[in-house]
Amino acid sequence: MFTLIIGNKNYSSWSLRPWLVLKMLDEPFEEQQIDLYLSDTKARILAANPAGKVPVLIDRKLRIWDSLAICEYLAECFPAATLWPDDAGLRAVARSIVAEIHSGFSALREHLAMNLTLRHINYQSTPAVEFDIARIISLWEEHLPRHQADGEFIFGGFSIADAFFAPIATRFHTYNVKLPEQSQAYVDHLLALPAMREWYGAAQAEGQRA
């Protein structure tokens, strides 16, 4: 059984990605959570991962400590799940999108931080934020129509790209970002997933415990 070490569900967008993949795989795993805002947080994370970050996936003696690396590993462990598209060209595009999310959209991260217990807060715009939002919308509006016959995810069936877009969807929901109809339908679809409802419920419970 896998063990996934994550941060607070209310805030940790990086943790959500591999957690959602594991849930969509319907694979059993043990979840260990480290509160990111306690006096012993740093020590606990370093004990789990010398790189000092979460998430971390443990598979027997193997530790993987980057959200993309974890998702790639899961794709290799479960090839029948097609976490990347079967087609080589689409797979390259999906990987490009995921890499762009993984290393980019810094303005969005800074100004629209993931916070699931906030409700429809109108964000303060900047040109950099609007550029990031426009880029994300352009990806959705380009790829969703091409694959809608195969399903409601970005490439039809669920993929790692959707797991990486999920935290962005939460941000757009929290900060009341206005979207075109098809992009809004995609956000609604992601947030309505049973796994995402479970994540939201746990995030709400964290707030009640604080």
Image (cartoon, helix red, strand yellow):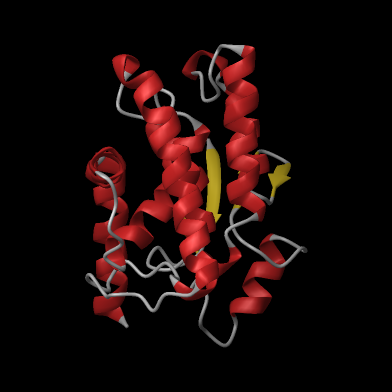
Which quadrant holds residue 185?
top left
Q: Position of residue 47 (x, y in %)?
A: 70, 66
Decide which of 184, 18 is in the foreground and name it. Answer: 184
Residue sitting at 34 percent across and 15 percent down?
150
Residue sitting at 51 percent across and 82 percent down?
37
**Residue at the outermost bottom position:** 39
The answer to whether one can see residue 175 in this image is: yes
Total numbered badges shown on the rendered structure: 0
Residue sitting at 67 percent across and 61 percent down?
48
| Quarter of the rendering occupied by the C terminus | bottom left
**Residue at the outermost front position:** 127
Q: Is residue 4 above or below residue 45?
A: above
Q: Position of residue 73 (x, y in %)?
A: 65, 32
Q: In the rendered view, does 66 fall on the left or right side of 201?
A: right
Q: Position of residue 42 (x, y in %)?
A: 65, 77
Q: Is residue 140 above or below residue 126?
A: above
Which quadrant holds residue 146?
top left
Q: In the rendered view, does 207 fall on the left or right side of 61?
A: left
Q: Is residue 38 above or below residue 44?
A: below
Decide which of 138, 148 is in the foreground and name it. Answer: 138
Decide which of 20, 164 is in the foreground and name it. Answer: 164
Q: Position of residue 7 (x, y in %)?
A: 50, 65
The answer to whether one can see residue 156 in this image is: no
Q: In the rendered view, does 9 fall on the left or right side of 58?
A: left
Residue sitting at 37 percent across and 70 percent down?
115
